[in-house]
Amino acid sequence: MSAAPAYRRILLKLSGEALLGELAYGISPTVMARLAGELKEVLALGVQVAIVVGGGNIFRGEGLARAGMDRVTGDQMGMLATVINALAIQDAVERAGLEARVQSAIRINEVCEDYIRRRAIRHLEKGRVVVFAAGTGNPFFTTDSAAALRAIEINADLLLKATKVDGVYNADPLKHKDAKRYDKLTYDEALDRRLGVMDQTALVLCRDNRIRLRVYDMERAGALLRIVQGDDRIGTSVFN
């Protein structure tokens, strides 16, 4: 493993639940401070970092849709929840002495920029963390799909999905002690076995556009830095 970065530009996918930490609802200051510290280490290597964040710690439109709410309305409310999370990440990053910009797929100009691909790339080239909010801007698409799409659009060298387990398993390791972790998978294997790596749309986007994906445990100290330095032992790598 080299100290030099193995990747020039990465996109980090964070679920809203990843921001909960020890809380049952909302955003954990402890998680935000740790995330900002890890991003600072990565940026110090010259790696460009973009983030896509979900909103499940605040609101899940799909769940209310099953209870009778209009699905489009629920998904739009979920998009707004991701904007809240993105602003929190921006604040944590800036308090760590770094620069950050939030770009939203829906217009909300009073609090953040509109998503413009060329502007996002320019921010990255200037060493700013770019946080993409509001998913794709469309209902019925997950933030996993948004992460795959943005990774393709900004020409990311690696898409990282941060989870609460250390990779992809053939069963839920929190429920099945004998679950097997995969070191490597192809996209076709992940799709055929329905392993829950990401939703099917996101996996197909990554496969067809040859995006490298790594799934890892975001609670493991130093994992993000080691991954960008080229340590292949962490998490599960998915690529055809």
Image (cartoon, rainbow, N blue to C red):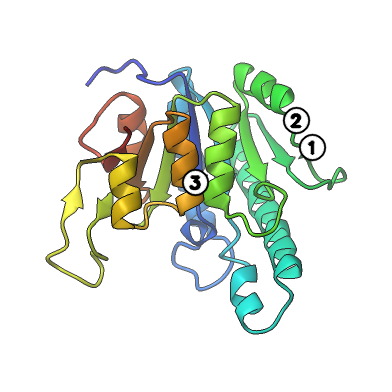
Q: CA distance from mark 1 to mark 2?
A: 8 Å
Residue behind mark 2: 116
Q: Give the crowd class for mark 3: few <14, some 14-19, many >=20 residues within 10 Å.
A: some
Residue 139, compared with residue 154, is above or below; it is below
Q: Secondary structure at mark 1?
A: strand
Tag 3: residue type? Ala
Q: CA distance from mark 3 to mark 1?
A: 24 Å
The structure residue drawn at horizontal position 34% and vertical position 41%, both measured from the top left corner, is 187
The location of residue 82, given as percent across then percent down, is 65, 55
Q: Secondary structure at mark 2?
A: loop
Q: Which mark is residue 134?
A: none
Residue behind mark 3: 202
Q: Secondary structure at mark 3?
A: helix
Residue 222, compared with residue 134, is above or below; it is above
The structure residue drawn at horizontal position 64% and vertical position 78%, both measured from the top left corner, is 64
The structure residue drawn at horizontal position 43% and vertical position 52%, both measured from the top left corner, is 198
Q: Earlier in the sequence, mark 3 or mark 1?
A: 1
Tag 2: residue type? Ile
Residue behind mark 1: 113
Task: Check whether the beta carbons of the residues at disc 1 and disc 2 lie within 8 A of each other.
Answer: yes
Q: Nearer the viewer, mark 3 or mark 1?
A: 3
The location of residue 106, given as percent across then percent down, is 78, 47
- Quadrant in which the C terminus is drawn: top left
The location of residue 117, given as percent across then percent down, is 70, 27
